Image: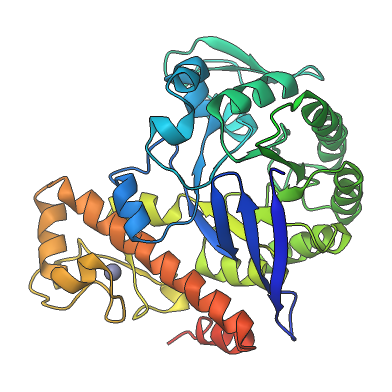
Amino acid sequence: MSLQFTITAKDPATKARTGRLTLTHGTIETPAFIPVGTKAAVKAMTTAQLKELNVPMLMVNTYHCYLRPGPGTVARAGGLHKFMAWDRPIMTDSGGFQAFSLSNIKDQPLAKVTDAGVTFRSHIDHSEHTFTPESSIATQEQLGADLIFAFDECLAIDAPYEDTRRSLARTHAWAKRSFDAHKRKDQALYGIVQGGRYKDLRIESAKFISSIPFPGYGIGSLFGEPKAESAEVLSWAMEQLPYDKPKHLLGIGAVDDIFEGVAQGIDTFDCVLPTRLARVGYLFSTACTEKDKWRYRITNVKYRESQAPLDPTCTCYVCKNFTQSYIHHLFRADELLAYTLASYHNIAFFMQLFENIRASIRNGTFQVLRAHWHRTE
Ligand SMILES: [Zn+2]
């Protein structure tokens, strides 16, 4: 059995729930936040540090590992878990999103999409490659994650209706082909719901994808503004998907989006946000407000002499041992340790946030917690 999912508590006022998701390399408590290790590494972090922070699972990107070092190299090393020394669950995406979004190189043709698959140019050396549903699944089988995703076409959420409709037909055919191509019994394969911002297409997609016996589902292409519209789009898909199966929101990690997703029954989230922002000096803090998205820039001159911790309520190693003044100095002096300490704290922030979310669902106070995180001052 590659996946087992048990719902352990339900919020009375929303669709939020806690659960236990068991995969080949372990059980994670949901809702869960899953940091991203794009090239089989969470930038600036060791896996020992990630474990210390109670990170339950990592997302690794298939597109990047396919291009470098190549899935054969990873397979010969014993798969991603051995290669990167991480014995907890891992998920890989299908590579589709990056093949579409990263192959847009100046003076080079865009990715070419046909019913067979997508042909794209490597962002590293501009060499030409093709992903098909079958080759995406084969690559993900070589990488060896616990949880993998069907190959889909990712259009922008605001793409025109006719383009989205045509793309959706292709995504659905590819979902079936991905399902048929998948052989490894120790991996769980999720189908992905697409459909842009169109109600009939989102509903059609959720119905079609749930007609294939995937053990769980991803919801894709939900980037965009306004937020209220994205929330509504998510609700169309969620209402059609089987309640008892786990659901993953792909690439979403802003605090307000997390609360909206959890309220609608999303179980797992992956996002580069905590680590990407850390590397440019943005630190998350409970002392910030929703207006500044719960983060501030440590490189600002006003932190030069601050003897306060990064976040007054955080108990992580960085907040216990270092001041804002020190982290400010590391960034100003281009010390590499800045990346590690900032990433460490930001991941700690998200781990604490999700622990609080799970506790609030268990004791019936999710709406109180949500209101607290919507305060603007
Ligand atoms: Zn901290």
Q: Position of residue 217 (x, y in %)?
A: 74, 49
Q: Position of residue 89 (x, y in %)?
A: 53, 46
Residue positioned 24% across, 51% down in the render: 340
Using the rendered view, name the quadrant where residue 111 is placed.
top right
In this view, 112 is above or below 303: above
Mark yes or no: residue 194 visible.
yes
In this rendered view, identify the residue nearer to me: 363 or 78: 78
In this rendered view, identify the residue nearer to me: 343 or 114: 343
Q: Quadrant of the N terminus?
A: top right
In this view, 305 is above or below 198: below
Residue positioned 24% across, 71% down in the render: 310
Using the rendered view, name the quadrant where residue 349 is placed.
bottom left
Q: Quadrant of the C terminus?
A: bottom left
Image side of residue 333 versus residue 100, left or right: left
Mark yes or no: residue 39 visible.
no
In this rendered view, identify the residue nearer to me: 12 or 259: 12
Q: Position of residue 17 (x, y in %)?
A: 69, 73
Quadrant in which ligand 1 is drawn: bottom left
Residue positioned 21% across, 65% down in the render: 318
Image side of residue 136 versus residue 182, left or right: left
In this rendered view, identify the residue nearer to me: 227 or 217: 217
